[in-house]
Amino acid sequence: MSEQVAPPPASDAAPQQPAVETPPPAEPEAKSSGGKKALGIIGAIVVFLVVAGLKFGLGAAIGNFLNKDETADAKSGDCIAELPEIKGDKEEEVDGAKVVECTSTDAAYSVVGRIDGQTETQAKAETTCNEFFKEGQEGYVFYSIESGKKGYVLCLTKKA
């Protein structure tokens, strides 16, 4: 029996194509995967910033911005945190005054009286809080009044 070798097909013959086409690589999925990774990283950064902000005082800053006057609801019997030391008739503007628990180590003043509906002139009068101070007791007047409007006065004594 003799074996024969057939010559290669002619080059002008049409190449055979496979019966089933293989799809091209899915590029949109690769981009989607990268987008998900980017969103995950951004999400992690946002969470980190929120946690860091709350831990390091951003929460207090936002709270102060939303509730600018933390003494607005102060009443007799409440306590106020440390304020700048005032000597004589000197007046000083204060930022960040706040009501604290009277058992707190931050409590420096006791509110012994409150007067609402006061003008700035009334608040500055020497007799404004006299009815709330005991004989010989050193007292302080704290007020929150916008210029040309009415506000409130807190009569304070040093917490013992």
Image (tube, rainbow, N blue to C red):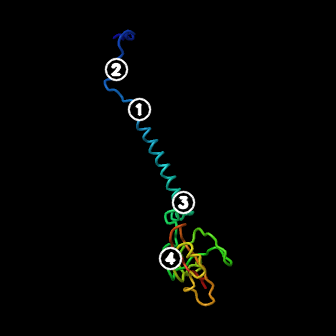
Q: Which mark is residue 74?
A: 4
Q: Residue at x 62, y 74 (%)?
A: 83
Residue matched to label 1: 25
Examine the rendered structure and indicate whether residue 34 appears above or below residue 149: above
Q: Amino acid at mark 4?
A: Ala
**Cα distance, mark 4 to mark 3?**
28 Å
Q: Nearer the viewer, residue 59 or 6?
A: 59
User: Nearer the observer, disc 1 or disc 4?
Assistant: 4
Q: Amino acid at mark 1?
A: Pro
Q: Amino acid at mark 3?
A: Gly
Outermost residue, left side: 19
Examine the rendered structure and indicate whether residue 35 appears above or below residue 134: above
Examine the rendered structure and indicate whether residue 108 appears above or below residue 26: below
Residue 18 on image: x %, y % = 34, 23
Which is nearer the N-term, disc 4 or disc 3?
3
**Cα distance, mark 1 to mark 4?**
69 Å
Q: Which mark is residue 158?
A: none
Image quadrant in which the N terminus is located: top left
Q: Which mark is residue 17?
A: 2
Looking at the image, do the residues carrying marks 2 and 4 touch, with CB atoms under 8 Å apart?
no
Residue 97 on image: x %, y % = 57, 71
Image quadrant in which the C terminus is located: bottom right
- Image quadrant of residue 84? bottom right
Label 4: how many Cα within 10 Å (few below 14, some 14–19, many 20+): some
User: Nearer the observer, disc 2 or disc 1?
Assistant: 1
Label 1: how many Cα within 10 Å (few below 14, some 14–19, many 20+): few
**Cα distance, mark 2 to mark 1?**
19 Å
